[in-house]
Structure formats: structure tokens, C-alpha cells
Image (cartoon, rainbow, N blue to C red):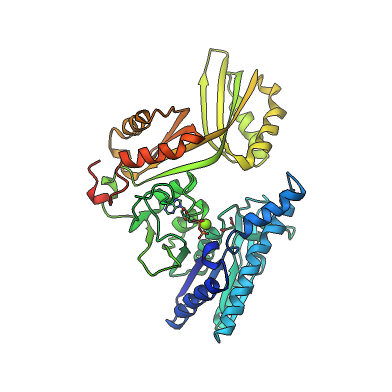
Amino acid sequence: MAILVQKFGGTSVANAEKIRRAAQRALQAHKEGYQVVVVASARGKQTDHLIADAKELNDAPPRREMDMLLATGEIQTVSLFAIALWDMGQKAISFTGQQAGFMTDDAHSKARIERLEVGRVRGMLDEGHIVIVAGFQGINAVGDITTLGRGGSDTSAVALAAALGAERCDIYTDVDGIYTTDPRIYTKAVKMEQISYDEILEMANLGAGVMHGRSIEFGKKYNVPIYVRSSLNDNPGTLITHEVPHMENILVSGATIQRNLAKITLLGVDNKPGNAATIFAHLASKRVSVNDIIQTEVSAEKANLSFTVAHSDLDVARQAITDIRSQVHCSSVAVRDDLAEVSVVGVGMQSHYGVAEKMFTALAHKQINIDSITTSEIRISCLVNLEQAETALIAVCDAFELDKPAAERQV
Ligand code: ADP
Ligand code: ASP
Ligand code: MG
């Protein structure tokens, strides 16, 4: 029997009526002959509310305790979901991450899945249940609850689909699919019928919150087709797959904005082999995820080194740099937490000229100053002032005609 994984995000299970509607979708797939696994997120803004509750008591709550707290959000949803299915006459069982077999490392608040033991899920499916799994959570080697990072339920769903050999993983959310950019900011954005794993992975890691980046890594590695669609209607969504027709001809497929970024600059560090390794090894030992790194030589003896981190890692990163500052002879440290990164992404830019020029011109026309630039084969990113970031995104989307389907673009 084919297995289908359906993931419902927070807005899709925000209240009783929405849970019932989501449960009906699961039941429908079951009636069509699928074994159905549902992965659910916390209801509505429940995760944000729990974070606010903790912050009322402690500005810097311990990450282990936050994981205990936040995991309760998803547990509420899955039990309610099962309760709704039983009311429809359907056998159903809810599982926490641990019960579903999610074994992770011990990086509280951003744990990575190490193993998935799906025996119990399989057993319940074979007995005719719809299985509902709490997304975003797992358990570490000593039995403590961990969470996978904000938006991590997507990763729970795709990882389960991979482990179970599911036919597909459907991601039900509050938009009709993946758009050229966030449609809440650029209302003219258009929906894509298909997108490649590589492009959406890059977009997700650069701030496109519609999918959790790690989920795409699982999908690509284990060949799970992922279909992103709305839980509110039956419009066609976006299929994430390996190859998209004519993708080499599309210069820029999408654009992203990443807020909550901070840039740390170490000024005047010794310009000698091994210094960068010392700095980044220390940051890694403190589990800081570093985004972009820029090093510039200022003289034969000295260099400046900048890197960006998420705001959530800023305090730990700042402390880590203080620890080793004297070791690398850094003369001063500068921190900016009022920046955002705007990026364009496209597999096609590997074989075309002029993408960077077009992006910089669009920003210049809006008088937007670029703090720094980073590139890869399939993306160009500019750090800009936070208050100009949305204007920057809109300007870039207009320049690359991201308001038109790819086939109609002149650029
Ligand atoms: P869920 O709770 O269902 O996981 P999310 O809020 O995590 O939903 O993700 C959906 C949101 O992602 C959309 O409402 C939209 O504002 C945002 N988003 C950002 N970039 C994109 C994009 N390129 N395409 C579609 N949605 C995007
Ligand atoms: N509830 C978690 C969050 O809000 C996980 C998720 O929604 O995917 O980040
Ligand atoms: Mg999400």
C-alpha cells in the first residue's frame, strides 16, 4: 500500500474547524487507498506565545527548557487531530517526536535528526490507523526533548516520508505554493508550478520561510517528491523536484529577504595561516551557525574578518569572539544587528552574464547602499540596511520581472 505524508502548518490547524478540515483531507486520502501519516505544527501562533511566556520569566531562557516548553505546542495539535478523526469514525493515533522514533543530536533549539526508527509508525499504519506525528521535535541520546529550529515541522515530515518510502510528501500551508518571492511583501509575485531542490534549498536557507531548509536536503537526498499547496483551497501547488523544464534558461527563479541577521566584524586580526581556522573552529564548538564570511587583507600583517549569524545566535557568537579575541590579536570588534540580506537565486545564472550588474543597478536606482555582497554559483546576496530591505526586495523583483511567469520574462 502506498504511503502519503501530509504536513499541516500552524495556520492550517489554528482552530477546531481547521483541524476538522485537515482531518477530512487525511481521511479522504485514506479512503483513496493510501496509508496516511500526518505531521502537524503547533496551532496558529502557539509557538510564539510560548516563547513570549518564557521571556516574561527570563530574558535568556535555557535552551533545554525552551525545547520542553515548545514541544507541548505540537503535542496539543496531534492529540486534537486524532480526537477529530475518531469522531469521524476513523482509527487514529497521535505520537510525540520520541514515540515516532525521531532521534536527534543534542543541539537544543536547532537539533539535527540522526536516526529515525519508524517501526511503531509502520505497525500502526498496518493496523489501519491514520498516524499523526508531532513535528519539530525529537529526543537526544540521554532522553531529553529537542527541537529542530523554527519551521522544523517541514523537516519532520520529509524525513518521515523518506524513512517510510512514501510516494509523496504534501506540505499544506497558508499560500497556494512557492512563489517567486514572499507574496506578503511583493504582492505581484507569481506561483511556480515546479522548482528544483537546489533552488528552493538556496531560497530556504536565504530566508524564504515557506520551507525549512533541512527538509529540502532530505527530499533531495532520498528522492521524495514534495508538493507545497494550500490547506484552504484545492488550487494546484508547487512540485519540488530534481529537474524543471528549461531551468537553464531562467536567469533568476526567485528572490528572498532575510531579516534577523547580525554582522560581526573582527578588525585588525593577524594576517597569518590558521587564524580563520581558530576563529571558526571556536564558533563551531559553540554551535554557532555562520552564514556568509568575508575576509579582506588590510596590510601584509593585518586583515579584517566579517561574518553573519542569525540574531538567535548573536549572544553566543559575541561571547565566543570575546573568548578568543586576544589569541588572534584582534584590535576591535564591531557588531551590526540592523541589517538584512536580499538575494536572487537561479540555476540559470551559472551560464549567463549581467545578473550582478542588473541587481546592483536596481538597488542604486532606489538609493540603497550595499553593505557587502556574497555570491555562489546560483545566487547573489546583498546586505542592506534593515529599513530599506523591503524596498530593495521589491526593486530587485521588478528588475528581474518576478511578477511574470518564467516563460514571459524578457530578462
Ligand atoms: P506554515 O505554518 O504552514 O509552515 P509558514 O508561515 O512557515 O507556514 O510558511 C508560509 C509563509 O511563507 C507564507 O505565508 C509566506 O508569507 C512565506 N513565504 C516566504 N517566501 C515565500 C515564497 N517564495 N513563496 C511562498 N511563500 C513564501
Ligand atoms: N511550531 C514550530 C514553529 O513555529 C515548528 C513549525 O511550525 O514548523 O516554528
Ligand atoms: Mg513553516
Q: Is residue 371 left or right of residue 97?
A: left
All told, the count of numbered labels is 0
Q: Residue at x 47, y 72 (%)?
A: 4
The quadrant in which residue 145 appears is bottom right
Q: Quadrant of ligand 2?
A: bottom right
Q: Is residue 395 placed above or below 177 in the rendered structure?
A: above
- Give the x, y percent position of residue 332: 65, 20
Q: Is residue 38 placed above or below 303 in the rendered structure?
A: below
Can you name the residue that lies furthest to the top here? 300
Which sits in the foreground, 114 or 360? 360
Residue 120 showing in the rendered view: no
Q: Residue at x 44, y 62 (%)?
A: 224
- Give the x, y percent position of residue 398: 32, 41
- Give the x, y percent position of residue 187: 38, 50
- Give the x, y percent position of residue 27: 49, 80
Which sits in the foreground, 230 or 164? 230
Quarter the C terminus occupies: top left
Residue 82 showing in the rendered view: yes
Q: Residue at x 52, y 41 (%)?
A: 259
Q: Is residue 86 left or right of residue 143?
A: left
The quadrant in which residue 355 appears is top left
